[in-house]
Amino acid sequence: MSIRLSERVPVKYLFEEGKLGNEYVVAGWVDAVRIHGGVVFVILRDRSGKIQIVAKKNVARSAWENAKELSVESVIAVRGELVSSKAALGGRELLAKELVVLSRADPLPIDIKDYEKTVLAKRLDWRYLDLRNPRNLTIFLIEAEMARAAREWFYSHDFVEIFTSKIVGAATEGGAEVFSIVYFDKPAFLAQSPQLYKQLGVIAGFEKVFEIGPAFRAEPHHTTRHLTEYTSLDLEMGFIDSYEDVMNVVEDLIKYMVSKAIAKYKSEIEEYFPNAIADLPKKVPRITIREAYKLLEQAGMKVEWGEDLGTEAERKLGEIIEKEYGSPLVFVVEYPWRVRPFYTMRKPDEPEWTLSFDLLFRGLEIATGGQREHRYEVLKRQLEEKGLNPKNFEWYLNMFRYGAPPHGGAGIGLERVVMQALGLPNIREARLLPRDPERLVP
Amino acid sequence: MSIRLSERVPVKYLFEEGKLGNEYVVAGWVDAVRIHGGVVFVILRDRSGKIQIVAKKNVARSAWENAKELSVESVIAVRGELVSSKAALGGRELLAKELVVLSRADPLPIDIKDYEKTVLAKRLDWRYLDLRNPRNLTIFLIEAEMARAAREWFYSHDFVEIFTSKIVGAATEGGAEVFSIVYFDKPAFLAQSPQLYKQLGVIAGFEKVFEIGPAFRAEPHHTTRHLTEYTSLDLEMGFIDSYEDVMNVVEDLIKYMVSKAIAKYKSEIEEYFPNAIADLPKKVPRITIREAYKLLEQAGMKVEWGEDLGTEAERKLGEIIEKEYGSPLVFVVEYPWRVRPFYTMRKPDEPEWTLSFDLLFRGLEIATGGQREHRYEVLKRQLEEKGLNPKNFEWYLNMFRYGAPPHGGAGIGLERVVMQALGLPNIREARLLPRDPERLVP
């Protein structure tokens, strides 16, 4: 092959000014082929876009011969001259001088153009083909951009990235939703969250930490909102005055992530995601869970005082807040002690409520956080009150005996943010390789 | 408490110009306390540095009373006036007007100042105290900076970040070094690397992908170089001409990561890490493994032709290359087929060697990579030749039937890069919460 792939340019580049009349190398997947006797039209697709390739028998016979045998989704490299063309997409096409097949595709098992024809489970079986549809690929470009923007935000606010262990010696928060591992001859588990370790980070002296990494939940449920493995965006910060400081951080961070991503992929979002969010509110409303109970009751949905909000209540509350405040985001604060984990700080004068919050985005919880109890004696009592064995948390409890600043933090589900920002119907669409009780492959 | 922590400034800030004479709030850990009658001197430490606090009975009685009861490593917040002082570190001290104890520390179980007095295993048991020593904390500030720099490099070179699943349905590369998970009623494992999934990313159309995430190896060995969980910096790129393209990327990336980090933490490295690397070579030498065999034999160490390099051989080779080329880094290329995984591309004319490489840093493998076999029939044969069951790799093999560009990539062990850059004696020092066959806590 005489085409050097190192000379390759992205397709998008060919539509810039000053490029016409020059020779270029492009490479990518065959989106479509049409044969008209001595001329073959090929649409070549790469991550950046699509361009028409024209292979003419009387210009470059070997390129034409290769082109007329092409199957869709084969990988090709082309060297050609960029010329203008009224008929071609974007007004330009590449007149092939060389065209080589790098990898020949068999007939496809699913329709990747009309992806909705295929049920999601089958699309996921063929994920690498499903993503050949630019709409589906774009979801993950947006996810990557949100992660990038989040880190940018963290760096500029003096948070230090930490890498905590996902293999743990005890279940983080108790409960049954934990996967066991065969760890040599010891019992071990997969971390449900880096909760205890990000607190360790603060107390060790990093002061403000973040981590973007996998979290594992042995949820046996099949819903459109749950995964057994997801990407958790965690933060923890020391020296806070109150859990309001944490909410301020989460609000600023989420706005930054989402607005950066929707700005960068504006045209793709307009093309592919009709239900995407258009704008974020200037200020996210904050209501206590007691106010939420009242609003829900007024709307005809009764949640018992002191109970958690379920899926339906969250959805309903999202609608109410959207209508009342014009905001797709809402912080619900002061969750009941009985539904929050042992490390949550309680309200000083009303210990049945806590200094904690959930952030709902279009009626779905995307973040949860609050201030943590940093007083050793109180923490120990709370652990016992939750029925946990202090022995299993010995190292954790000890941490609070040697200087622990007041601190708080939050965990954000990255896939949920993407799902709600784009208005996707199922969280599996926002996860490259989703895991649920049935799915382990690919 | 009347001190608002939101007004807090980092200690470092107080040593900038134009600050003397003003009032500031600082907060952090008590590094030391000295009592001289009506005056208490406290050294306060935060992530950014240390400053002397002076609490005088005749200036602020309550601050003085609190100060004289302080224990080391307690967390305090101080409001005071910044004044110059010949005796104080950096020529400045904070004259306390208010001093409050946020968290009182018990006597410490380990000596955190003279950390070398304590064996590493015990330091790790008390990791959050061990890190109160600025030398130990700095290791992780450097690690975070390397990760930040790596991402910066990836973004500017058009790599897309992906988040792959760590729960997998089959062992990635075969072999026994894999952890089993109890996954509902199915057999499942922890990913040894994102190898197959980053290839999926390339083939799905991301073209160039990276991931920085956990990798798991059920290595029963106790060495100073192995962890059962580590942070793997993975990259994979499509449309390559040769595995040299991958080496160019790895070389550029490693230089960028390491040089950014050692530049940012220059003074800390000079203070704490006498064995740290000073400079990186302009060009990293590349030698075939056959040349390596010869060099080793000349130096009196015989490695069988066609065998892998062991720990001792790598160390020796590092010394030879340092002496011959003046480079702490060396690429060893064309590893024997029999010691490389099934997906490795073989040398066209000499199939007993492969288009693969390891990168050694001061005699330790820090990266491994190469070109991958993307031709379906060849890949299937190689899988069988390695004694693996094609059934377990069905989805993976199928990927190569629908258009797979030539591609390659590499995996880099982040902790090993940090360890070798700083000249640390044990990889556990470069892992926040190390896991080995004995260690699951904290």
Image (cartoon, coloured by chain):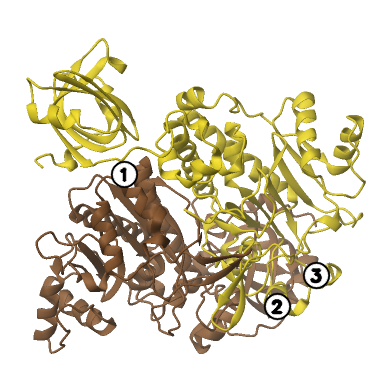
Chain colours: A brown, B yellow
Residue corresponding to mark 2: A71
On the rendered structure, is B107 left or right of A12? left
Residue visible at 87% across and 57% down?
B348
Q: Quadrant of residue B228?
A: bottom right
Which residue type carries mark 3? Leu
Name the mark on residue A157: 1
Q: CA distance from mark 2 to mark 1?
A: 51 Å
Instruction: Please determine whether, in this image, residue A252 is positioned above or below residue B280.
Output: below
Which residue type carries mark 1? His
Residue corresponding to mark 3: B383
Q: Quadrant of residue B196?
A: bottom right
Same subunit, tags 2 and 1: yes
* Mark 3 nearby-residue class (10 Å; few <14, some 14–19, many ≥20): some
Residue visible at 7% across and 20% down?
B58
Where's the N terminus of chain B, which quadrant? top left
Is disc 2 in contact with disc 1, using a CB cutoff of under 8 Å? no
What subunit carries mark 2?
A
On the rendered structure, is B203 left or right of B306? left
Mark 1: which secondary structure? loop
* Mark 2 nearby-residue class (10 Å; few <14, some 14–19, many ≥20): many
Q: Quadrant of residue B172?
A: bottom right
Which residue type carries mark 2? Ser
x, y percent for residue A126: 60, 79
x, y percent for residue A124: 55, 79
* Mark 1 nearby-residue class (10 Å; few <14, some 14–19, many ≥20): few
